[in-house]
Image (cartoon, helix red, strand yellow):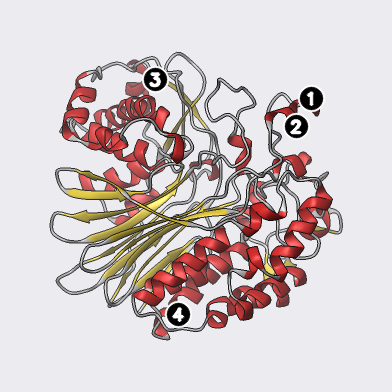
């Protein structure tokens, strides 16, 4: 059984110990939670390149001590040349996952940091930008140890054809081993330039100009104006009022609506009969939530209807009544696209709470590394369809759906919980494990997970091997098709984390996923 670290006044949780250490340093230097998260995100962008980077997207949730919740959307749209006709002329059946044509959406991460820094200043933050980026610069210039997480992810053969990938991420033409030292001097130069010129330079300065030229040379459908005009956005957070908490998430293009709806439906099915019911109910609630929220998992400017309707008690009650408590329902409408990423959390001494996600989508994104800046570009646009009548059809300026899913909950006793992971299925599992089933933060994050994928009449339930065999037999008896994946802590279940502040004494508990290389540290 894992222990949950407890800190006196503030804490961070990050998917890499080095990132957690810089977050702790920022807090100790008087920085606030937003500043600490930006510093951790920058370090993660260097040391975990298979999961995230400057060439990716990100999403912030920030809760002020008095209760106001801010949501920042740093997802980029498709480039001006990203038309379906372009891809059809190249005889693609779908948007490719690797190469220049996969690098088709603007990278929003750095603009999100800029918007986050503005919020940090409004909350009293005063630390200079170069201090927030100092560890990321050092990691890129002086070298960092390749993580075990990266080695486990492996190198897919299709990455090798992407320009700049092999020279940047391979070691003498072979996959790097865990602990080997990698240096990225061009990325260090880019980060150092941003530390002096400001984050806007990534889009509208010297760095932005070099990025645009490199993308053009690669043959990407992103043009310079796409980069120059891009800015992260302040959006309205979603919220669901549950029986023991109010839970906040981000709207489309994140899958936050699905996770919140699943929690609300599952809550109406609560049973005291044990693990089998707990898992069956949540699986079936997720199916209903995913089906209902599918029309809202698209470009946020094109949503027809009010997503808040799916977060109200009448919807939860109605959907719960449609669930057979003893039998798995058929399901084929929507299975979310796989994608990687990181989750970071922080609660500072004043009670500011941050939940943050950052990603390049698939492992190493498009695989393309820009020559002048050392930035590797994401492939979030692979989620688009080339079918004009399909879900999320590709068009210039459209936003693809994402799997990043940070959340914040305010519990009935005023405890504040920042948590999250990648996709719509991890978040409800760790939240229910802690809040509804009464486990510790550490046990909620460590508990074996399932993931519903395509296959079978009701979907194929992939499960970690630590599940009790009797529970799996009972789920099979209810009609769930189950595949054990032979790993106690499977990478495909994503890396999650939780961090919670107790208002009576100000103490903060924090944990990051044992499936990765993360850590929790604090003051």
**Marks 3, 4: nearer the viewer:** 4
The residue to which callout 4 is attached is: 26
Q: Tell me which label, 4 or 2, sits earlier in the chain.
A: 4
Secondary structure at numbered mark 1: loop
Question: Which residue matches tag 1?
Answer: 91
Mark with earlier residue (2, 3): 2
Which class describes the residues within 10 Å of circle 2: few (<14), some (14-19), or many (20+)? few
Question: Label 2, label 1: how many angstroms apart (C-alpha)?
Answer: 9 Å
Q: Which label's residue is closer to the chain start, 3 or 4?
A: 4
Q: Secondary structure at mark 4?
A: helix
Q: Which mark is residue 268?
A: none
- The relative height of residue 121 versus residue 502 in the rendered view (above or below) is below
Q: Are marks 3 and 4 in contact (CB under 8 Å)?
A: no
Q: Is residue 154 above or below residue 93?
A: below
- Element assignment for label 2: helix
Q: Nearer the viewer, residue 189 or 121?
A: 121
**Picture coordinates of residue 484, whole percent (x, y):** 49, 30
Who comes first in sequence, dot 1 or dot 4?
Answer: 4
Residue drawn at x 38%, y 19% as measured from the top left: 476
Answer yes or no: is residue 520 visible. Answer: yes
Residue occupying the point 34% across, 41% down = 429
Report the front residue among 122 and 80. Answer: 80
Q: Which x, y percent locates residue 399?
A: 54, 41
Identify residue for label 3: 480
In this view, the mark in front (2 or 3):
2
Q: Earlier in the sequence, mark 2 or mark 1?
A: 2
Answer with left or right where residue 75 lies relative to residue 443: right
Quadrant into which the N terminus falls: bottom left
Question: Relative to residue 294, is residue 148 drawn left or right?
Answer: right
Mark in the foreground, 4 or 2: 2
Residue under label 2 = 86
């Amino acid at each position: 059984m894992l222990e949950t670290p407890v800190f006196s006044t503030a804490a961070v949780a990050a998917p890499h110990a080095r990132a957690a250490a810089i977050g702790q340093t920022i807090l100790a230097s008087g920085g606030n939670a937003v500043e600490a998260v930006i510093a951790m995100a920058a370090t993660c962008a260097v040391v975990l390149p298979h999961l995230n980077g400057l060439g990716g997207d990100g999403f912030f949730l920030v809760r002020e001590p008095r209760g106001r919740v801010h949501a920042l959307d740093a997802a980029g749209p498709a480039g001006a040349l990203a038309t379906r006709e372009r891809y059809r002329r190249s005889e693609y059946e779908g948007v490719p996952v690797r190469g220049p044509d996969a690098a088709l959406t603007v990278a929003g991460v750095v603009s999100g940091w800029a918007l986050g820094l503005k919020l940090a200043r409004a909350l009293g933050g005063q630390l200079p930008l170069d201090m927030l980026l100092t560890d990321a610069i050092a990691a890129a210039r002086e070298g960092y140890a390749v993580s075990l997480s990266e080695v486990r992810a492996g190198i897919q053969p299709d990455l090798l054809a992407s320009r700049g990938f092999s020279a940047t991420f391979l070691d003498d033409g072979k996959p790097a081993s865990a602990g080997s030292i990698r240096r990225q001097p061009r990325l260090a130069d880019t980060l150092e330039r941003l530390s002096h010129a400001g984050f806007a330079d990534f889009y509208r300065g010297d760095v932005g100009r070099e990025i645009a030229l490199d993308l053009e040379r690669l043959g990407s459908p992103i043009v310079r104006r796409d980069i120059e005009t891009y800015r992260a956005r302040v959006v309205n957070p979603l919220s669901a009022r549950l029986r023991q908490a109010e839970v906040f998430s981000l709207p489309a293009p994140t899958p936050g609506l699905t996770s919140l709806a699943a929690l609300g439906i599952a809550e109406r099915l609560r049973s005291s009969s044990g693990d089998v019911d707990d898992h069956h109910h949540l699986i079936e609630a997720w199916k209903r939530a995913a089906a209902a929220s599918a029309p809202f998992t698209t470009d946020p400017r094109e949503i027809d209807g009010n997503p808040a309707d799916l977060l109200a008690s009448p919807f939860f009650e109605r959907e719960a009544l449609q669930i057979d408590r003893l039998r798995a329902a058929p399901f084929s409408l929507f299975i979310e696209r796989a994608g990687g990423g990181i989750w970071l959390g922080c609660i500072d001494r004043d009670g500011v709470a941050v939940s943050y996600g950052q990603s390049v989508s698939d492992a190493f994104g498009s695989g393309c590394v820009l020559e002048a800046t050392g930035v590797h570009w994401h492939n979030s646009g692979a989620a688009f369809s080339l079918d004009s009548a399909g879900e999320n059809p590709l068009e210039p300026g459209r936003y693809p759906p994402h799997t990043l899913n940070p959340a914040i909950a305010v519990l009935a006793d005023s405890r504040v919980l920042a948590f999250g992971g990648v996709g719509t299925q991890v978040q409800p599992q760790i939240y229910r494990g802690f809040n509804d089933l009464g486990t510790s933060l550490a046990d909620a994050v460590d508990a074996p997970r399932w993931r519903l994928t395509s296959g079978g009449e009701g979907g194929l339930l992939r499960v970690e091997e630590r599940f009790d065999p009797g529970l799996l037999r009972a789920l099979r008896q209810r009609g769930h098709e189950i595949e054990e994946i032979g790993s106690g802590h499977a990478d495909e279940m994503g890396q999650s984390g939780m961090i919670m502040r107790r208002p009576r004494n100000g103490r903060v508990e924090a944990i990051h996923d044992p499936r990765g290389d993360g850590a929790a540290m604090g003051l």
